[in-house]
Amino acid sequence: MQAIEATYLGHSLAPRIGEFIQIRRDIHAHPEMAFQEHRTAALVAAKLADWGYEVTTGIGGTGVVGRLRRGEGRKSVGLRADMDALPIVENNGTPWSSRHAGVMHACGHDGHTATLLAAARLIAEDVDFDGTLNLIFQPAEEGAGGALRMMEDGLFERFPCDAVFAMHNMPGLETGTFHFRVGAAMASSDYVTITLRGVGGHGALPQTTADTVVAAAAVVTALQTVVSRNVDPLHSAVVTVGAMHAGTANNVIPDTATLELSVRALDPQVRQLLKARICELVDLQAASFRVKAEIDWRDGYAVLVNSPQETRFATRVATALFGGERVNAEAPPLTGSEDFAFMLQKVPGSYVLVGNGGPGTPGACMVHNPGYDFNDEIIEPAARFWMRLVSEYLKEPLSI
Ligand SMILES: [Zn+2]
Ligand SMILES: [Zn+2]
């Protein structure tokens, strides 16, 4: 650890952050998959209760909300952290490596949870505000939609928020730098399975078959034209065929072939265009080879859209704390996806990226990689950002 000089309200935070580095490493050593975050949720609930929060557990499965009310103010703000891990075998060699075989905190959600806990304690002990603070610890961000499950369980009816904010670490960006973007910041992500059904037969007698391998190859090639020929070149879209399965032997023509696609866009209208065009193209290509196409389209996460007012507010908070050189107010959008998008469809707010380490440093190892680890040096500045954001938002909103 580098020495930390930071202060808040005149007190050095350094001696108080060590506890949360230990908590982060403890959560890291005990990763839990989507909706299985029982140990993590219990730890979060116990800590929040210790610090005076009203704690509600079991929201959307293993979700936890800690509420702290002060004064008579009617304003409320929500801060969200995610708690789930990934099915990856860890190999970063740290003493706090996963003790659960095949499960790893490879996206830093251990760090997001520990950081929000650090903010929870420091706010409870040090920050005056007037209103309601809701700390939202969600399960299952990695594809299983924990945010939606919490919302279906009445998250924002039971804990109304005028604004919500979330943070994610970002490898490759300098440690402790803050990155904001107004508008679309992360992509929608849809899952598509295409099954082609033809007529199988002997490899020596193709004239008696409707060959699904040839049809699948043509479909994959044709799909490349959706982004290159149908989407406005000034917009972004991704159509990836990540899996293709057909056949078992060189002399047998298979009667089925399947393709698995990931489809992403940064604009809801582009997302609709992709769906319409992919379905049309697959159907027509299949028909041209006399095979039938079944398309199983599963809508994943929505486009994540940061609201202008709240994003600018959060940017000003970070700039006031850290100075303009550590803040990027116009970060580029990402083609990754994030289910905080659903919370932002319901409540205005913003999703901030915090640098996990610049190029050439250990923190630059990308998330979802067996060698990744959350950079503990982020905890202090990110917790300080949450503290200042709460004190400003619940004092005179949007005033700084
Ligand atoms: Zn992830
Ligand atoms: Zn993540």
Image (tube, rainbow, N blue to C red):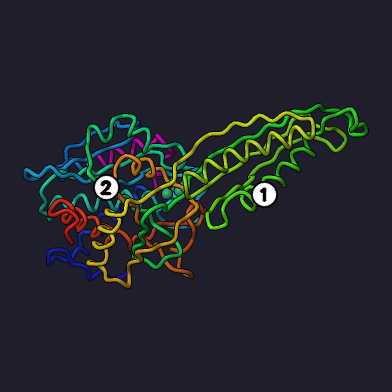
- Residue at 74% across, 39% down: 216
Whole-percent x and y of residue 79? 27, 47
Residue type at mark 2 is Leu
Q: Looking at the image, which is closer to me, 56 or 215?
A: 215
Image position of 327 (left or right of 173):
left
Q: Is residue 215 left or right of residue 174?
A: right
Q: Label 2: few (<14), some or many (≥20) within 10 Å?
A: many
State the residue position of label 2.
79
Could one spot residue 102 in this view of the protein? no
Q: Is residue 35 found inside the magenta-colored segment of the image?
A: yes
**Circle 1 is placed at which residue position?**
225
Image quadrant in which you'd find residue 352: bottom left
Residue 130 visible in this rendered orientation of the protein: yes
Indicate which disc, 1 or 2, sits on the residue closer to the N terminus: 2
Which circle, 1 or 2, is nearer the viewer?
1
Residue 397 placement, left or right of 167: left
**Dot 1 amino acid type:** Thr
Residue 292 sits inside the magenta stretch: no
The magenta span reads 28-45
Asked whether 84 or 264 is in front, the reply is 264
The image shows residue 388, relative to residue 337, as above or below, that is below
Residue sitting at 12 percent across and 53 percent down? 395
Instruction: Indicate if the residue with disc 1 has its beta carbon within 8 Å of ligand 1.
Output: no
Q: Position of residue 23 (x, y in %)?
A: 30, 51
The C terminus sits in image quarter: bottom left
